Image: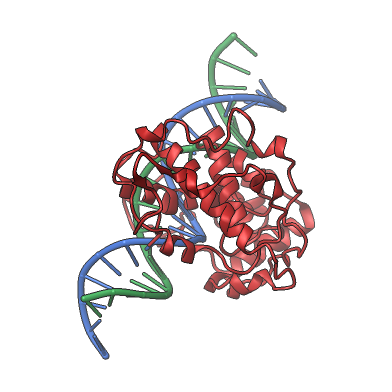
Chain colours: A red, B blue, C green
Amino acid sequence: MSKAKSNNMYESGNDELRRGPWTLEEDNLLIQYISCHGEGRWNSLANFAGLNRTGKSCRLRWLNYLKPDIKRGNLTPHEQLLILELHSKWGNRWSKIAQHLPGRTDNEIKNYWRTRVQKQARQLKIDSNSKKFLEAIRTVWMPRLMEKMEQDSSPPISSSPSSSISTMETQKYSTTSPVSKQAPFPCPQPDNMGINSDNNFSTNNISELPENLEGSLNQFENSLDENYYYYDTQALVGQDISMSECHVEGMDWLGEDLWNFR
DNA sequence: AATGCGTACAACCGCACGATC
DNA sequence: CGATCGTGCGGTTGTACGCAT
């Protein structure tokens, strides 16, 4: 297989398989074929569908983009919270995490983690896989998310989630299913939220956290989605995390310019 | 208005694993 | 039992876009 980076990634060049961005025509071919014949056998599917693509490419395009139940748009605070918590349990098991966020793909979650979460780690100059960063997430980020969810607990349920879907791609393809105005996924019970007695938002060992954990959450809050928190957050809020717990040993964890996303 | 920079995300790759031959 | 194939997963990269200067 020729390496994408060794030559022009987005040129088919000759009779070789196409790579790079999918065209609307290709998408339609794939959608139509799968609607008639179903998924699977991706290599032969690519041939029979008349797509000059690898099976892997077809599979990826379908699973990450074209599949009807794919939910697009920004992650809700609850989804972000869930990702943080599940990642703390399972690490980079993106597909496993994605199973708990119906409509979200492992690719999307992975991108979120890399672009948002790891950025925080970089700013804090700590390893995103370190215990310190995990503690920071649990003691600062998660409580803030929960607080945000609480603040907006008078849910504008009727507001359309699609209002936050603004990508050009989403506008280009309107094949995505309308997002349910009910809970976007089965409400997990506290037991399966992964937040329990041995995996809670403990503030133990906060003193081990780096001193540069100072800054504000203002920009962070601004980065949160504003419209739809229709999830029953009681399971999480019930953990009774007080923001005051984030003030430890004279350190103001909630000060300026921390946890901002941009 | 032009340019540079940072971010988000689609799409690729290599590798691993299970099923089938 | 080994080889091959199909599939899934996690990591990485390229590009479009938005924002700041």
Residue in the foreground of this view, choosing between A245 and A45: A245
Residue in the foreground of this view, choosing between A165 and C21: C21
Residue in the foreground of this view, choosing between A27 and A73: A73
Residue drawn at the location 66% of the way across and 61% of the way down: A229
Residue drawn at the location 74% of the way across and 41% of the way down: A189
Tell me if I can see residue A9 in this picture.
yes
The correct choice, above or below, for A76 with respect to A59 in the image is below
> Quick one: quadrant of the N terminus of chain A?
top left
Please give left or right for residue A160 compared with residue A13 in the image: right
Tell me if I can see residue A54 in this picture.
no
The correct choice, above or below, for A19 with respect to A191 in the image is below
Q: Residue A27 appears in which quarter of the rendering?
A: bottom right
Q: Residue A72 appears in which quarter of the rendering?
A: bottom right
Give residue A42's position: percent from left, percent from top.
64, 46
Give residue A119's position: percent from left, percent from top.
37, 51
Please give left or right for residue A115 compared with residue A57 in the image: left
The correct choice, above or below, for A40 with respect to A73 in the image is above
Residue in the foreground of this view, choosing between A26 and A114: A114
The correct choice, above or below, for A259 with respect to A169 in the image is above
Please give left or right for residue A186 compared with residue A62 in the image: right
Residue drawn at the location 76% of the way across and 51% of the way down: A38
Give residue A51's position: percent from left, percent from top.
60, 58
> Quick one: quadrant of the C terminus of chain A?
bottom left
Q: What count of labels does the image hold?
A: 0
Give residue A206's position: percent from left, percent from top.
41, 35
Residue drawn at the location 52% of the way across and 35% of the way down: A202
Please give left or right for residue A29 compared with residue A143 in the image: right
